[in-house]
Amino acid sequence: MLLLDTSAVSAFMHRRPHVVRQLRGEDPSVLYLCTPVAAEICFGLSRLESDSRRRLLLASEFQRLRAALRWVDWSEPASAAFGRWKATLQQRGTPIEDMDLAIASIALSLPARLATCNIRHFERIDELELVDWSEPEFKVR
């Protein structure tokens, strides 16, 4: 199971070649989106001019991805993981944004690997298996 984070979805929407190739190489039945990612994407789209060509193209790419992949929602186990990791990261003095932590918590609760183009925040969560899509050479951490 592979959960896509916001940066991976955004890279797909912007047609980054290495991310498009990676998505096409995966079995669609193992790829998932989650509601916090949708919220962040909707926020980003809403910041663009409503009738701009860019917004329409990006929204179309997001709709295409949404239709092709399965969804997971916030759950009680994800809430428990969120609370535990928010406290841990705060105690370490290395907190991350709540939406990133929500996405990570959903991945931990499934369990799923997390595909991201921005591992900097997520690598603070020791239990999380990351797939780094920021470079053409993908790494599992």
Image (cartoon, grey):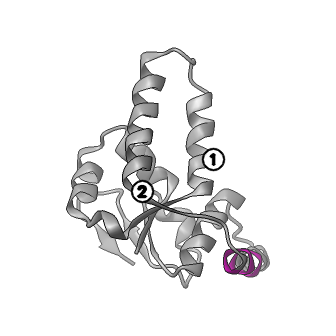
Residue 107 x, y percent position in the rendering? 54, 73
Task: State the separation of the CA atoms marked 2 and 1.
Answer: 18 Å
SS class, disc 2: loop
Q: Is residue 18 above or below residue 128?
A: above
Q: Main secondary structure of the magenta part?
A: helix
- Mark 2 surroundings: few (<14), some (14-19) or many (≥20) residues within 10 A: many
Residue 75 x, y percent position in the rendering? 68, 72
Magenta segment: does it hold 82?
yes
Dot 1 corresponds to which residue?
Answer: 39
Of residue 128 and residue 60, the one placed in the foreground of this image is 60
Of residue 125 and residue 36, the one placed in the foreground of this image is 36
Question: Which residue is at 35% across, 70% downward?
Answer: 30
Q: In the rendered view of the protein, which quadrant contains the C terminus? A: bottom left
Amino acid carrying mark 1 in the image = Ala
Q: Residue furthest top?
A: 51
Q: Is residue 22 left or right of residue 34?
A: left
Q: Would you identify the image quadrant in which residue 126 lies?
A: bottom right
Callout in the foreground (2, 1) = 1
**N-terminal label among 2 and 1:** 1
Q: In the rendered view of the protein, which quadrant contains the N terminus? A: bottom left
Q: Is residue 22 left or right of residue 125?
A: left
Q: Which residues are magenta?
A: 77-84
Question: Which residue is at 55% across, 68% downward?
Answer: 122
Query: Residue 26's mark?
Result: none
Q: Is residue 127 left or right of residue 18?
A: right
Amino acid carrying mark 2 in the image = Cys
Question: Which residue is at 57% across, 18% downward?
Answer: 50
Q: Would you identify the image quadrant in which residue 32 lies?
A: bottom left
Question: Which residue is at 67% across, 63% downward?
Answer: 96
Query: Residue 117's mark?
Result: 2
Q: Is residue 51 above or below residue 64?
A: above
Mark 2 and mark 1 residues within 8 Å of each other at the beta carbon: no
